[in-house]
Image: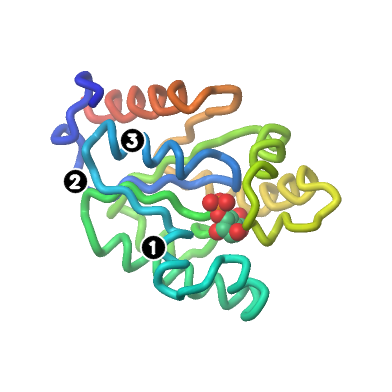
Amino acid sequence: MDDSLHADSLPKVPLVLIGMMGAGKTSVGQALSTALGRPFLDLDEEIEAQTGRTISEIFAEDGEPCFRLVEREVLMQSLEGSPDIILATGGGAVCAESVWTALHGNARVVWLDVPVEELADRAQLKGGRPLLEGVASPRRILRDLLVVRRKWYERADFRISTGGLSLDESVKVVLERLKEESS
Ligand code: S3P
């Protein structure tokens, strides 16, 4: 654990990582969980566990609007489940007023902000992202999505630019920022 930041010095509220596909929410969240000794949950994995289907199957069989309803329900449950959880959300999970009503004052929200060019390179490395499957230009899709989503992401308590940073560097920057905020 990073001995410069003790988990006990952080408010006991969920730490919610938001941002675009490929921003590193899951890997940064897992590393923060190890560093801080707090439980970690990946929202997409939880959705898959609860529904018994992959994210791609839910999109294909029920459509995106249905996926968003399930996503919001599982997000709300996760926030209520454990006050010290570190939660990595899916890229579109916080794009609704009802979600921010639940987050506001009840969680610390961190936006991992990465330039679109880098997101496109990273997001392509991992499959299972229906919004990018079979598209000619992931970069264009991501750019268009960010235009719509930026206003939601800007509601985060902190925006942390992790473009060009390794996982370890990203985690270090987030921990430093959390430390500054709690001192
Ligand atoms: C989505 C992001 C994905 C997943 C789904 C939709 C989005 O999660 O929830 O494919 O709308 O941006 P990641 O951000 O973890 O890739």
**Quarter of the C terminus within the rendering:** top left
Say which residue appears at 36% left-offset and 35% top-offset.
31
Amino acid of disc 2: Lys
> x, y (%) of residue 74?
39, 68
Find residue 114 and report its horizontal and vertical position in percent.
60, 34
The residue sitting at the left extreme is 8
Which residue is the site of mark 3? 32
Residue at point 67%, 54% (across, down)? 148
Amino acid type at circle 1 is Thr
* Label 3 or label 2, whichever comes before in sequence order: 2
Residue that label 2 marks? 12
> Residue at point 38% right, 63% down?
101
**Residue 152 visible within the image:** no
Ligand 1 has an atom within 8 Å of the beta carbon of the residue at disc 3: no
- At mark 3, the secondary structure is helix
The mark closer to the camera, 1 or 2, is 2
Q: Name the residue under label 1.
A: 101
